[in-house]
């Protein structure tokens, strides 16, 4: 077996472990989860897991990194979006992608379980903190590199705005989980409206125009 195939097989095995861990978290939570539980869910051996992860926290870190990569991809892809449409229209498309990702039922349950564990497990809390910082750095640097001339926003303020938007999205997850009777379609629509309006309001203030005027401008011209 050549080196490329070996690498591909190892990556597939590693992903199987991560996905088995996610299924376990959805069933029973994270706090009492053991590597043996994950091995049983995967249908493999405990020894096989140790070939890829030294402990449960390393698997948690891999889960968090995968989700962070997912949201970075959404953010960067949205930032590079080209084509016709106003700033308001394209921003709405962009925020819709984020809201739909956060409302994903399985992903929400795993993320909330990890956040709960972080309240009592310092290592998990550090994992989440590092992932959040990476997310903020990548998105803010992407905005600065591509739009700073037209949209000069201090990096510290931009990261604070990102953190606030993220807190709304995290709250959206909790709301969807603990309010099963809520109209999810309406919840989705309201969340998108609030995110779009909040971002437009910040940008409009920096340009000295109204939100309505700004929403009709070309996409980050």
Image: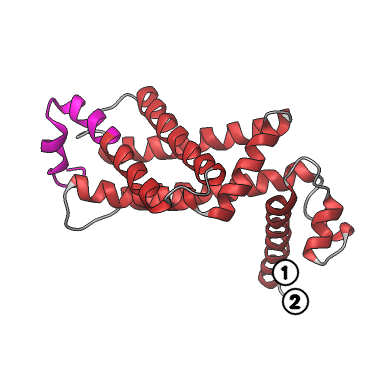
Instruction: Give the distance between the C-alpha atoms of the residues marked 1 and 2, in whole angstroms.
Output: 6 Å
Q: Is residue 205 magenta?
A: yes
Residue 211: image quadrant is top left
The crowding category of the residue bearing disc 1, from other C-alpha atoms within 10 Å (few below 14, some 14 to 19, many at least 20), is few
Kindly identify which residue carries mark 2.
1
Query: Magenta part of the protein: which range?
Result: 198-221
Left or right? Give the position of 181 relative to 23: left
Q: Main secondary structure of the magenta part?
A: helix
Q: Is residue 97 magenta?
A: no
Q: Position of residue 157 (x, y in %)?
A: 36, 23
Left or right? Give the position of 146 relative to 71: left
Instruction: Please report the residue visible at 13 percent of the width from the left and 37 percent of the height from the top.
Output: 212
The crowding category of the residue bearing disc 2, from other C-alpha atoms within 10 Å (few below 14, some 14 to 19, many at least 20), is few
For label 2, the SS is loop
Q: Position of residue 3 (x, y in %)?
A: 70, 69
First in sequence: mark 1 or mark 2? Answer: 2
Quadrant location, the N terminus: bottom right
Instruction: Please report the residue visible at 37 percent of the width from the left and 53 percent of the height from the top.
Output: 77
Kindly identify which residue carries mark 1.
6
| Residue 147 or residue 209, whichever sits in front | 209
Cβ–Cβ under 8 Å for marks 1 and 2? yes
Q: Position of residue 173 (x, y in %)?
A: 51, 43
């Amino acid at each position: 077996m050549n080196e490329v195939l070996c690498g591909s097989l190892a990556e597939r095995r590693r992903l199987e472990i991560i996905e088995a861990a996610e299924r376990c978290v959805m069933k029973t939570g994270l706090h009492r989860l053991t590597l043996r539980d994950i091995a049983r869910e995967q249908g493999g051996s405990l020894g096989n897991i140790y070939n890829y992860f030294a402990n449960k926290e390393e698997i948690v870190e891999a889960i968090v990194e995968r989700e962070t990569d997912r949201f970075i991809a959404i953010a960067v892809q949205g930032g590079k979006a080209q084509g016709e449409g106003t700033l308001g229209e394209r921003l709405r498309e962009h925020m819709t992608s984020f809201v739909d990702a956060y409302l994903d039922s399985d992903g929400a349950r795993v993320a909330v379980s990890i956040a709960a564990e972080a309240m009592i497990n310092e290592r998990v809390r550090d994992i989440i903190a590092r992932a959040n910082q990476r997310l903020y750095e990548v998105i803010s640097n992407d905005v600065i590199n591509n739009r700073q001339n037209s949209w000069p926003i201090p990096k510290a303020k931009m990261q604070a705005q990102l953190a606030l938007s993220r807190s709304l999205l995290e709250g959206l997850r909790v709301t969807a989980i603990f309010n099963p009777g809520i109209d999810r379609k309406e919840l989705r629509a309201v969340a998108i409206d609030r995110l779009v309006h909040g971002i437009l309001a910040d940008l409009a203030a920096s340009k000295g125009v109204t939100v309505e005027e700004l929403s009709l401008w070309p996409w980050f011209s």
